[in-house]
Structure formats: structure tokens, C-alpha cells
Image (spheres, grey):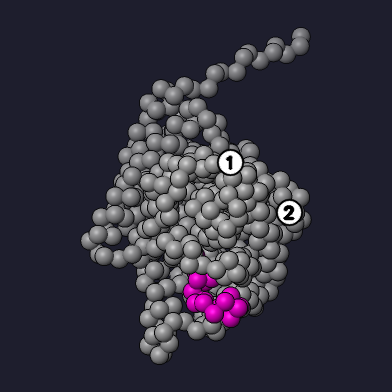
Amino acid sequence: MPAQAAGPAAPPPGLRELLRSPGYGRLLLVSALVGVPVSLAAFGFVGLEHELQHWVWESLPRKLDHARAPWWWPLPALALAGLLLAPIVTRMPGRGGHTPVLGLGGPPTLPVEVPSVVLAALAALPLGAVLGPEAPLMALGSGLALLTVSAAKRAASPLLGPMLGAAGSTAAIATIFGSPLVAAVMMIEAAGLGGAQLTMLLLPCLLASGVGALVFTGFGHWTGLSIGALSLPSVPRAGLPDAGDFLWGVPLAVVIAVVLVAGQTLGHRSAAFTAHRTAVRTVLCAVLVGGCVAGYALVTGRSPEEAALSGQATLGQLAADPHGWPVGALLALVLFKGLGWGVALGSLRGGPIFPAVLLGAALGVAAGGLPGLGVEAGLAAGLAAGSSAVTRLPVTSTVLAAALLGDQATDSMPLLIVAAVVAFLTATFVHRVAAPGPDAGSDAGPGAGPGAGPGAGAGRGGRARGPGAGAGPEPGRPAPAGPVQ
């Protein structure tokens, strides 16, 4: 007799069943508790990185009788960064973290790999690598969070490791983007989930983000240390966007996306170049980044610090006085910092988002002189478009731009949304046209690829490091929801 057909598949567990599963309450408790030590470690990391950066680019030049860092300063600084980074990326476990051009996704950072991530970031970022601190922070948070559970427990519950890692990453970047809400939204959007799965991920991330923000804020007031968060202390007053803002804002977002995808494509070429003879070529790429930064200082006569580093300080200066920047200096900043950023994406260690936001803002302010646009609208559109083009997360990018603009965001919100969506669509289309071959880096799953948002591909046995990334049969997607053991 023919085999009897199998019965209908059991319906997936509902939200109430998932929330009442034996391990989920413990996961929420652990997520809140983990947020405290992870945030303390992240605060110490960013505080130390910021102090080293200040010493290299401000205190040391003054001790050598320079009013500011001279034009040639980036050359020895980045050469030293390459020399320090080379043994880390070739010999230490974890290789200093993943290559920035691959976005913020990838396999989870295991606890044994955390030292190399921290050392690589401290070797590259303070010395002028044109990258941000967000990726090392997320790796640090993920690795420390996984210390709380054994490998056997992670193997027995496939969702436990990714969700706990996501909570740790959220706590680590709770205030680095200016608001804990940005970190939580980033995790949620990057996960690409819905229904019960979304709620299961949302609650640990929100808890960790809130605890992380509390620790960052408290220790910042207590110690007086600056963490170099992405923030704009002063922004130009904007009115309601009009037809001219949208007529120029849409093509501006397209241009920003094309420029940033070009930088990411350069990053893939750089990654392919450093894949062989990694130590020597890492140093060569670091010197090339230093040459780009020095070129900016030579051409404009301005401080090389404006084109070096992650860009949050320069972004604050630009937003505070956009009319004080000549268009030529802004275009030179985009050219030289963009080239340095592209090379650094494939060879050094850090995050891709901070410099991209500055590049988008610089292009927006440069276009502010167009009839009917204005620097206020250009800045707003540039912030949203720059973030969206590099992360492929338009909702997160809109929230980030709104957090940066503060009380000016309400009037600018329609323009922020349109710019973020247009940049996302343009970057996605242009990347498909200009993406290099598989040897230079391939998509690892939904949202992966150059500048992919957090939670992009799975790897190393299906584990995924990045907000919301999960382990499962499909790369970059968490396994079907089930009770947490």
C-alpha cells in the first residue's frame, strides 16, 4: 500500500507560548544583567579611544610646537597604524574582526576573539583610520555577552546565542549613535523579522539598550570622559521643506548613494588586494589612507584631522557653521576622505557608518547653494541619504538623522524619509550593477554585501554576529521561532 500522506504541519507557536517558554524569561533577565558589564567595557573602550585620538591629533602636535597637526602628520600616524595592525590581522584569533566593507554582519565574535578586535580598533582608529567605532563595539558586546552562556547551551538552543549576542551588541552601541533608540531600531530592521519572532528579538534588545544608555550616561557624568558619540551640538534652523527641497533632494540622494557605493567598491578591491601577503599590504594600504588625508590638507590648507578619523567631530563643526565651509573644501573632503574611506574599508578595522554620514552631509551642504535648496535642507537630506546608502537600512537611517537634528527634525521629517528611501533604492540598484566578482566579496544573504547592515550573512557554522542575525538554514535569517530552552 502507498505510504500514507503525512498530516498537516503543526502551526507555529504563538506569541503567548513563546513569551511563556521556560528560557525566555531567563533570557530577558540575562539581557538586562549583561547590559551592565558590556556597557562598562564599551564605555572604557570608547573613552580610551577618544583620549588616544585627542593625544595623537591635538596634544602631541602642540608639544612639538605645531598649532595643529601639520599636513604630513597622517603619513607617519597611519604608517604606525598599519605596522601595529599587521600582526593582529595575521596572527591573533579573530584577525582583529571582520573587514569593514562587509558591513556590520557576519559570524558572531567569540569571546576568544574579543582581544584582537579591541587591539585592532585601538591600533587603527586613534591614529587616523577613516572608520568609525561602531563595528568593534558591536563585536565587543557580542563576545562579552556570549561569555555568559556555555557553548553547549548555545548549541542546544539555536536562538539563544544570536539573541544574546544581539542584546550585547545593542548595549555596546546604546549611545554611540546619539540615542539608544537608534541602536534598538537598527537591530530590529536588520533582522528582517515579523510577528512573534520580531517581539522575541525586540524585548532583549530594548532592555539591553536602555541599560546600556543608563550606564553610558551615568559614567560619562561621573568621570567627565567624552565617548565621541555621533551627535550635533548645534544645527542650523530649518523650515518646512518646500518643492525646491524635494526637487533637489531626490537627485542629491542619488548622487550621495552613487558616491558611497563607489567607495564600497573600492573597499572590495582593497580587500582583494590585502587577501594575499596581508601584513605587507595592510601597511601599504594604511600609508595610502594617510596619503589621502595628507592630500586633503595640502589642497585645502585646512587641518588633516578633518579628513582623518571617523568624522563625528568634523560633522559637528560642519553642522554648527555650514556657511563657513567653502564648496571647494567640501568637495575636497568628499574626494580625499572618500578615497581614504574606500581603501580603509577593505584593509583596516573599524565601522563603515560614521564616515559615510559625514560624506553625505558634506555633499548635502555643498549642494546647499543650489537655487531653492539651502544648506539646512541639504544637511538633513545628506545625513539620511549617507546612512541609508551604506547600511541599506532606511528606517534606521531616518531615525538616526532625526536624532542628530534634534528639535529641527520635526519639520525636516518628510525630506529625511524621502532621502533615505531614494538613497536605499539607488545604492541597492547601483551595487548590483557595480558589484565585484565573488573573489572580492559576495553577498552573504539578505542585506549583505558592501555596507550591508547588521545581521547580514551567517557563517562559521551558521552563527551570525550582528544585531538580529540568527542561525538557521537560510544565511542571514534566524531559525523559525520556537520556545527558548
Q: Residues within 10 Å of mark 1 (few under 14, many from 20)?
A: few
Counting from the top left corner in percent of width and height, residue 85 is at: 54, 73
- Residue 380 showing in the rendered view: yes
Residue where numbered disc 1 is placed? 243
Is residue 204 shown left or right of residue 426? left
Counting from the top left corner in percent of width and height, residue 71 is at: 54, 82
- Residue 140 showing in the rendered view: no
Is residue 449 shown left or right of residue 330? right
CB atoms of marks 1 and 2 within 8 Å: no
Query: Residue at 39% of width from left, 74% of height from top?
Result: 54
Residue where numbered disc 2 is placed? 435
Q: Amino acid at mark 2?
A: Ala
Q: Is residue 308 magenta?
A: yes
Q: Judge depth for marks 1 and 2 and give the one in front.
A: 1
Q: Nearer the viewer, residue 457 or 303?
A: 303
At numbered mark 2, what does the secondary structure look like: helix, strand or loop?
loop
